[in-house]
Structures are given as structure tokens and as C-alpha cells.
Image: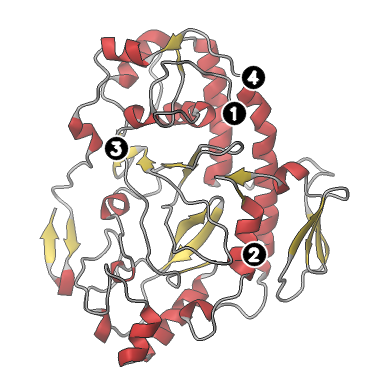
Amino acid sequence: MPSVTHDDAPLLADLMPWSVAPPRLGRGWPTAPDPASLKARWDAFVKAEGPEREALFGVTRARTLHSAVAQLPGQSSGTGRLARASGPCAEPVRVLHGPFDEQWLIPDNRLIDAARPELWRVADERQVFAVEQPPAPEGPVLLAVSVLPVITPPSKTVPAARPGRVRPLYRRPGGLEPNLAPGLTDHLAKRLGHSPAPLDILAWTVATARPGPAGHAVPLTADPGLWARGTELGHRLLRLTRRDGERPKLPGGRRPYVRAPLPSRPLELRYDRDEETLHLDEGLISPVPPTAWDFEVGGVRVLDQWFTARAGQAEPGTLEAVRPTGWPQGWTSELLELITVLALLAELRPEQAELTMETPITAAELRKAGVLPVPDAARRPASVLDHHEEGPEGQFALL
């Protein structure tokens, strides 16, 4: 945890005031580690009729086969009642299923208990979502990702590290209207001698955010040198958590490789700390540094959660049981990259700890400057007056 601390550090909730709870699915089958399984699940769903279709769907108070809901912004799913749905499913999209675990989702509002359309409206290639994580002795308190995080139902086999509030960096598509306290950038410009970009402010936030009694706090500094070191470190963290640049690599000799072929369907994950070897049944991957194996978010080991989401047993006869019969090669590549990312993130922790607060910008200073408290409008989503979306049963609405 960074040592840039101060008793009067401003809160993340004030610096990035607009936040939304993550989309809550209410059922597990609309997400999967591979898109082909989702299309097969949808086909099985629409082929079923009557009570069988209802049982496969998983009725909740928020969604039944007869719920009338609008289309998800930016998606092309149907809006007719699911009781008479037919044809192919909407093209799956990438989402954050768990910390460092990107999976696929059928982007159909009829399948999602609480879709949070305000988040879908601002999701594009420029957007970055800062996702609060549960307090824990180790691990990041904030993850910055390029895809929407979702909450799936609790599972007996998959350990849960449930995300907290989602804070988009931008309030409008196209990287427009930063989700920052009004006046914050101008105040930082006066104190630092230059105007930081929104992504720079997020980079600093990711590098320095820490849990506190009133919520996540973000120590700020007016020292240009410290700000430069913190933002440079934060950008390295962002490149690893967003996974939107070149594939990360460890130096030669430290890169993980498959040393013994993985079985067609590994069921057990074990780690040999002395040998720095990851065992997937009789399959072997090494070297895997202990820091990657021990990496946790919200008190849950990331590698455990990632593996169990793919190898855990689904209840026969459910749509979740429609999945690959073997272990796709693509999952092995994803696992090798995940090990690399976790190892590199762990290596950056000492640099975070070495950031020592100098010339702090306190919450009291921001209140005196009129940056705090933030106006109520900054905590609400921006209106999108020219945006048409399909409502229930094909009707259109102007938002």
C-alpha cells in the first residue's frame, strides 16, 4: 500500500463524483469464457418452449420471460418478450467477470436484472472504468479497466471478489467531459505549474488510492517531481490492468512456459512454491513467481478465481453446463499472460510504497478553493439529448 498518506486526503468519491453500481446479471449463463458457448446456450434456450424455457432462463423478481425492457445502448439485441424470442443471439461482448478475468457476455437487457444503461452509453474505446475493490490487507483498492465489470450470482465453486462502485473517467462518449470534480484540473494546474490530462489524474489515483474509514482516499500533491513520479508509475499500472497495449513480457528466463502439456480438462490447480511451478493436474507451467500466485484482490486469490471459473463443474441440465468439452488453447495463452501481469504488478508495489507525500493538497484546501463540495449535478450522469434507443417491443425513445 502506498505511503503517500495524509489525514485530510480528499476522497475518491469527491474527485470522481459520478459513480454507478456494476451491472448485476441475476443469472450466470449469459457470461462465459468463450463466445461460442454463449451462442450455443442461446440456441438451446430459444429451442426450448414453455416451462422448459422458463426453467433454463432462471426467473427472478427483476426478469421473467415476459419482462418488457429497452435495448441496451449501443447493442443490437431484440426487445420483444423472451417468451417468444427466436433467431441468433446478440453478438457477445467482452466484460470483466472478475478481477483480471475478461469473459464474454450476451449484451441483451432481457437477460440482465440490472444492466445500468448509463454505463453502456459511455462505454467506448476511449473510456476507462475505475472499479473500487473491497478493502483487504493486500492487493489494489482500485482497478482501472477498459471493459464493463459485471456482478454474477454467487457460486459454490467460484470464490467471489465482488466489485464496488464503477467510476467512468468520462461522462460522455468519445472521451468528452471528464468525470472529475469541477475546478479540480484548474486547481492542480495552478499548484503544479501545468494542466494534467484526465488520464494523468486517473494514473495518479490508481497509484496512490488507499482505503479509509470514510471511503477510498486519494492523497494529492503540489510537488511537480512527486506528481511526475506518481503519474508515470500509475500509467505503468494502467497499461497492465487495461491490457490495451502490447502483450506484457517478463525478462528472458523468468517468462512462464508450459513445461508439461495440460490435460484436455484439468480439474485441480496446485502450486509448488519451492519449484515455482503451477500444476493443472499433470500439466505444468513454470516459472510462476510466488508473488503472482499470492496476488489477491478483495481477499481472493486471482489465479484461483480465474481457474475455477473455467474448470468448475456446472449443474447438469443447466445452460451453464453448455461449455467447451476440453481446455481451449486460448485459455492457456490467457493464463500465461495473466501470470505475467500479476508478477509485473507485484513488482511495482515497492515503488508505490516509496512514494512519500510532500506538499500535500488537502481536502480543506480544495474546500477553500471552491472545488469541494462538488455540485449535485456532477454526481449524476450527463444527459444524452440526441441519443435514440429502442424501447420495449421495438418502440424508440429520445433520451
Callout 4, which amino acid? Glu
The residue that mark 2 highlights is 331
Q: Amino acid at mark 2?
A: Trp
Q: Is residue 124 left or right of residue 85?
A: right
Q: CA distance from mark 4 to mark 2?
A: 36 Å
Q: Is residue 3 visible?
A: yes
> Picture quarter containing residue 3?
top right
Q: Give the left or right position of residue 296, taking residue 181 as reference.
A: right
Three-letter code, disc 1: Met
Asked if the residue at tag 3 contacts the one at tag 2, i.e. Cβ–Cβ closer than 8 Å, the answer is: no
Mark 2 to mark 3 CA distance (whole Å): 35 Å
What's the CA distance linking mark 1 and mark 2?
Answer: 31 Å
Q: Residue at x 37, y 51 (%)?
A: 22
Name the residue: 54% across, 50% down. 99
Q: Which mark is residue 1?
A: 1
**Of the residues under marks 3 and 4, which one precedes in the sequence?**
3
Name the residue that disc number 4 marks.
Answer: 354
How many residues crowd around disc 2 within 10 Å: few (fewer than 14), some, or many (20 or more)?
some
Mark 1 vs mark 3: give the one in front: 1
Q: Residue at x 54, y 14 (%)?
A: 226
Label 3 SS: loop
**Residues packed near mark 1 inside 10 Å, few (<14), some (14 to 19) or many (20 plus):** many
The disc, 1 or 3, on the residue closer to the chain's N-terminal end is 1
Residue found at the very far right of the displayed protein: 275
* Quadrant of the rendered image containing residue 101: bottom right
Q: What x and y, as percent, mark residue 379?
A: 24, 35
Q: Are dots 1 and 2 in contact, CB under 8 Å? A: no
Residue 378 found in image quarter: top left
Looking at the image, which is closer to me, 293 or 221?
293
To which residue does mark 3 refer? 18
